[in-house]
């Protein structure tokens, strides 16, 4: 059920929106698995000399050749990467921004890397980010269509109930 002002709306109103937390979360974990597989394949046979020459030595000291998700700048992945406000408009726009940032990262990788064994799966992941962006955009439109007020940005439609 989705709360719309004073009424409870059946989920069926949103059934045409075909992205769910479960399906998207599963796919995002698959993206991580693909990236980790690529990194593992590229680093599994490095010699200590190659580790140093590649600039991979600081990472190697902490993690050897194990996979440890982090940004290209060396900042480890953490829960601070997730943003959530409980306002469907804010959260969907944040989701859309995350998809665009991921697409841009893949674009940048494709500019730097020429190995087809790396580029082909990166292109696939880039395509999925575009689809996710489109699905979140559709979800944002569905949410806006079902709000009581067309003044979307003056209040949080999940919590602020306006008196008429």
Image: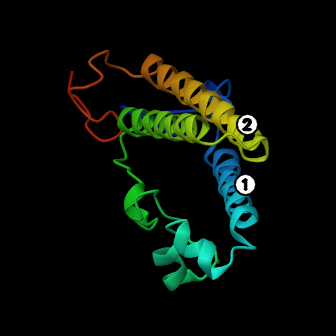
Residue at x 30%, y 22% (from the top left corner) = 152
Q: Quadrant of the N terminus?
A: top right
Which residue is tagged 1?
Answer: 34
Residue at x 56%, y 34% (from the top left corner) = 111
Which numbered disc covers residue 145? none
Mark before the other along the chain sequence, 1 or 2: 1
Query: Which of the two residues, 33 or 149, is positioned nearer the viewer here?
Result: 33
Q: Is residue 90 left or right of residue 18?
A: left
Mark 2 Cα-neighbour bin, 10 Å: few <14, some 14–19, many ≥20: few
Query: Which of the two residues, 98 or 65, is positioned nearer the viewer here?
Result: 65
Residue at x 64%, y 50% (from the top left corner) = 28
Q: Is residue 138 left or right of residue 98?
A: right
Question: Considering the numbered disc 2 on the image, is that residue within a helix, a strand or a loop?
Answer: helix
| Relative vertical location of residue 116 with respect to residue 26 in this rendering, above or below | above
Q: Quadrant of the C terminus?
A: top left
Picture coordinates of residue 91, whole percent (x, y): 41, 40
Figure quadrant of residue 60: bottom right
Residue at x 36%, y 39% (from the top left corner) = 158
| Relative vertical location of residue 77 with respect to residue 5 in this rendering, above or below | below
Picture coordinates of residue 67, whole percent (x, y): 62, 72
Picture coordinates of residue 19, whole percent (x, y): 65, 36
Question: Considering the numbered disc 1 on the image, is that residue within a helix, a strand or a loop?
Answer: helix
Which numbered disc covers residue 124? 2
The count of marks equals: 2
Picture coordinates of residue 22, whole percent (x, y): 67, 50
């Amino acid at each position: 059920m989705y709360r719309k002002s004073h009424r409870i709306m059946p989920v069926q109103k949103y059934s045409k929106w075909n992205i769910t937390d479960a399906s998207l979360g599963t796919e995002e974990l698959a993206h991580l698995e693909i990236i980790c597989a690529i990194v593992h394949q590229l680093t599994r046979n490095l010699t200590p000399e190659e580790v140093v020459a590649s600039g991979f030595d600081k990472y190697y000291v902490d993690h050897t050749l194990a996979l440890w998700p982090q940004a290209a700048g060396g900042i480890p992945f953490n829960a601070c990467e997730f943003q959530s406000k409980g306002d469907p408009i804010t959260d969907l726009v944040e989701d859309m921004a995350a998809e665009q940032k991921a697409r841009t990262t893949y674009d940048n990788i494709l500019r730097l890397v020429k190995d087809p064994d790396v580029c082909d799966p990166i292109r696939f992941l880039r395509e999925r980010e575009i689809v996710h962006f489109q699905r979140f955009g559709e979800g944002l439109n569905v949410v806006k269509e079902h709000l009581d007020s067309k003044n979307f940005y003056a209040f949080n439609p999940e919590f602020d109930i306006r008196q008429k």
